[in-house]
Image (tube, rainbow, N blue to C red):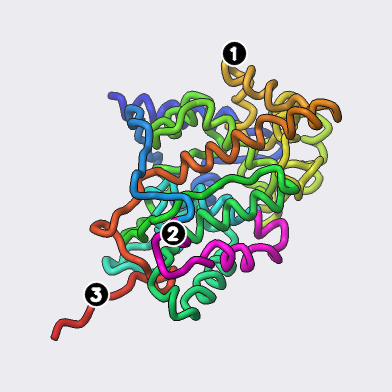
Amino acid sequence: MANKLVALAVLASLLGGVSCELSLSLSIIYKLYGYTTPILRPYPIRPPSPAPSAPQLLVGYYAKNTTCPKAEEIVRNAVKNASPGILAGLIRLFFHDCFVRGCDASVLLELTNDGIPTEMRGGPNLSLRGFEVIKAAKEALEALKECQGVVSCADILAFAARDASYILSGGYINYDVKAGRYDGFKSNASETFEELPPPFGDLSLTTSMFAAKGLDEKDMVILSGAHSIGQSGCSSFSTASIEPVLGKKLNETCGMPVNAATTVPMDYKTKDTLDIQYYKNVISNDVLFKSDASLTTSTQTKSLVETYAREHSSLERLFLGPEPWYRDFGKAMVKMGDIEVKTSKEGQIREKCAFIKPPPTPY
């Protein structure tokens, strides 16, 4: 019975976002998520997990506990010359990795031993970007004898997301990253649809899916701010409830019928900057996704949105520093980085991020 209610809720969410202007249909949404037939799969609504903890993770792990003290510097060098779009993709890569099987680089796998399509092939992940930066960082690390087989791909993802956030925010977001993760053995495309919060979800659905990962409602509001950067495919949203001026512009860009290959900025006003403009957009209904617009539908989340949307004056910045969201975003990223971390018994350090390292050949 519970699954049926969840399915009906998701269906209502989907239908509620349909507009005449974009002719968004269930079939388009299911194609977007990698399913050729419109078979409704209910989202699992789990009880909240306990607060995530990973005592094995340490700040400065590679400098203090391994032979690869320049690990973070090498990753930073791979990230620093990336375009704004790729930098935004690196933050999204980390989010999509941690929400499916935890922060274990399962999103990077092209092949696994069981032959099942990996997360990379899942519908919500088909537009992921930044793989080449992670590959370059890993190759640079493996080229150093002292770093061979030492730095996990999962930690590279965490470092890269932090460095991308720093660049895109103009240095306002800067936080210490705990490390010591191991890379997972499994990756399943179907789990991306089940675990990743969808853009058409309402507040209840999105909150419950964050809670299932040990992240509370405040974490959800904070991490949603990453929609200040990056692109969205035109098939991922409906203009039915978007502010009319922006809605008209989106209709003109996306076409009628919708051109699924066309992408638009998630934040038209500061599209290449990770900043608090997102929260101003939520208040004025200049956001693309129902999940973003839903943040004003409860007193608690609306209050947080209004807090994060408030811009400091020059005097306040002098004495208080940047707006609270920049600091809180770093804290939430650290918390997300603790989700379902693998130990040495549950994972490995891959030599190549796209492939599981084969077991040693027995003598």
Secondary-structure class at tag 2: helix
CB under 8 Å between discs 3 and 1: no
In space, the residues marked 2 and 1 are separated at their CA atoms by: 45 Å
Tell which residue pokes out farthest to the left in this image.
363
Q: Which percent across, then down, holds residue 157?
A: 51, 58
User: In the picture provided, is 151 more to the left or to the right than 55?
Assistant: right
Query: Which residue is drawn at the image coordinates 50% and 73% (left, top)?
Result: 141
User: In the picture provided, is 198 more to the left or to the right than 183?
Assistant: right
Q: Which span is picked out in magenta? A: 61-87
Q: Which percent across, then down, holds residue 362?
A: 15, 82
Q: Which residue is mark 3?
A: 359
Answer few, some or many: residues within 10 Å of disc 1's Cα (few below 14, many 20 plus, some between 14 and 19). Answer: few
Per the rendering, the mark at residue 299 is: 1
User: In the picture provided, is 143 more to the left or to the right than 115?
Assistant: right
Quarter of the image containing the C terminus? bottom left
Figure disc tally: 3
As for residue 323 lying within the magenta part, the answer is: no
In this orientation, which residue lies closer to the viewer: 318 or 232? 318
Query: Which residue is drawn at the image coordinates 49% and 79% (left, top)?
Result: 144
Q: Which percent across, then down, holds residue 236?
A: 61, 44
Q: Which percent across, then down, holds residue 24?
A: 62, 40
